[in-house]
Amino acid sequence: MSVKSQNLVRTTLPGWCGLGGFFFSIWVLHFTNDEPYIKAAITIGSIFMVMFCAEVFLCIRGNFGLIAAPSQRRIDVRRVLFKISGLIITVLCLSSIYWVFYGYYNHLYKPYFQALAVGWPYLAAFFIFCIVWSDQRSDEHEDANYWIAYAVFNFKFKLLKNTNLKQHILEWLIKIYFLPLMFVALADHVNFYFNINNACASYNTFCGFIFFIDTAFASVGYLFANNLTDTHVRSADPTLLGWACTLICYDPFWTLFGAKFLSYGSAWGLWFYFRPALQIIWAVLIGLCLTLYVWATISFGTRFSNLTHRGILTGGPYAYMRHPAYIGKMCSFFLIYVPFMGTNIIVILRNCFLWGLLGGIYYLRAKTEEANLRSMGPEYDIYATEVRQNWKKLLRFENLLFTRRYFM
C-alpha cells in the first residue's frame, strides 16, 4: 500500500522556507535587468524549489505523500503515455479559453504568455516527473488523465464515467483562471524598491512589499499542486455559490460589478492629511492587518489556492482563526477606505452598509470553503475544535498572568 496523505497540515515550515527563497530571489534580481516576466518566473522558481525541498524532507520524515512511498510495481510505459496524453489534452482544451475570450488579448496579460512561452518545457518536465513517479507508487492505477486519453484515442467516451471528470475540469479551471491574475500582478511588483524617506513613502513601500509576497506565493500555489508532496487537490468547490462569491472578488468581475456597486468610501490619507500623528497610527494599524493577511498566505506554502481543499492548515494564524486571511482583508478594507468618515450621515450609513455587504460576500466564501473541506471527512471539525481549545489555553494563560501579577 502507498503512503497515505495528511489532511491536517501541522507545520508551516515550507512557507517560511519559501520566504527565504523569496528574499534570495530579490537579492538575485537586484543584479539583473531582465524583463518583468523573467524576474517573476525566477521569483516563482526560487520559492518553489526551496519549499519543495522542505516538503520532501517533511514527507520522508513523516512517512506521507508519494515522494516517500515505496515502489509498488514496475513502470507501465503504456499507462504513463496515456496519462501524459490526457494531461496534454486537458491543458490544450481548457487553455483554449485564452484564445476564445478577447479579454486575454489585452496587453495586461502579455507577461503571463511570455513566461509560458519560455517556461513551458520546465513545467512539462516537472509534471511528467510527477506522473512517472506516482504511477509506480499510487494506489490509483488509472487517474483522470489516463481515462481522458483512453476515451479520446479509442472513441469510447462512456469510459469517462470511470473518473470524476467534473472535479478534474474544475481543478484545472481554477488554475487557468487564477494563475494569469496572480502572475501579472507579480510581474507588476518585481521591480519593487524600498522608499522610506517619509511616512507616506514607507506605508506605500510596505503595502507594495506585502502584495509582492502574496502574489508570488499565490502563483506558486496555483502552479505546483502535486501528489508527490501531498499538496494535490483533494476537492474543488463544486457549488455555484462558492464560485460566484469568489470570482466577484477578482477581475474582471470585480471591475464589472464590485467596483461599481460596492464602492464604500475614500482613501484614508485624505481624512488624516493634516493629522500626522494619527496618520502614522492609522498606517501601523493597516500594516498589522495586512501582515496577518500575508502571514496566512505564507503559512499555506505551496498549498495556497482558492476554491480547493489541499489540506487543512492548523499552524500559524490558523491555530487561532479559521479564516485569518479574510479577517485581515476586511479589517484592512475598513481602515483603508474609512466608510465611517464623512459629513453626511446618510452617506456614512450607506458606506458602512456596503462594507458590510462586502463582508457578507467573504462570509459566504468562508462558509462554502468550510462545506467543501467538511465534504472530505471529519478533519475540519477536528480542526475547528482545536481552534477553540487553543483560545481556551491562551485565555487560561492570560488569567494566570493576571492572578500572579495582582495577587502574589
Image (spheres, rainbow, N blue to C red):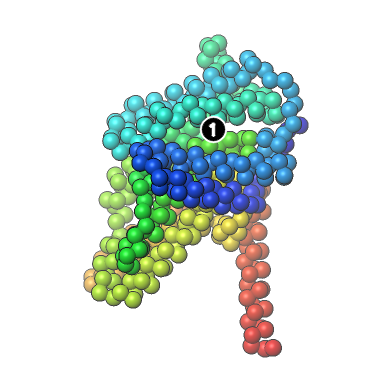
The answer, for residue 165, to whether it is visible in the render is no
- Residue 405 in percent (x, y) is at 64, 85
Helix, strand or loop under label 1: helix
Q: Nearer the viewer, residue 349 or 299?
A: 299
Image point 65% across, 28% down: which residue? 133
Q: Residues within 10 Å of mark 1 (few under 14, many from 20)?
A: some
- Circle 1: residue type: Gln
The answer, for residue 121, to whether it is visible in the render is yes
Q: Report which quarter residue 142 is drawn in.
A: top right
* Residue 291 vertical placement versus 31 (above, below): below
Which residue is the site of mark 1?
167
Image point 32% across, 50% down: which residue? 258
- Residue 240 in percent (x, y) is at 45, 40
Image point 27% across, 51% down: which residue? 260
* Residue 242 vertical placement versus 296 (above, below): above
Quarter of the C terminus within the rendering:
bottom right
Quarter of the N terminus within the rendering:
top right
- Residue 134 in percent (x, y) is at 65, 28
Give the total of numbered labels: 1
User: Outermost residue, left direction?
Assistant: 344
Q: Nearer the viewer, residue 340 or 251?
A: 251
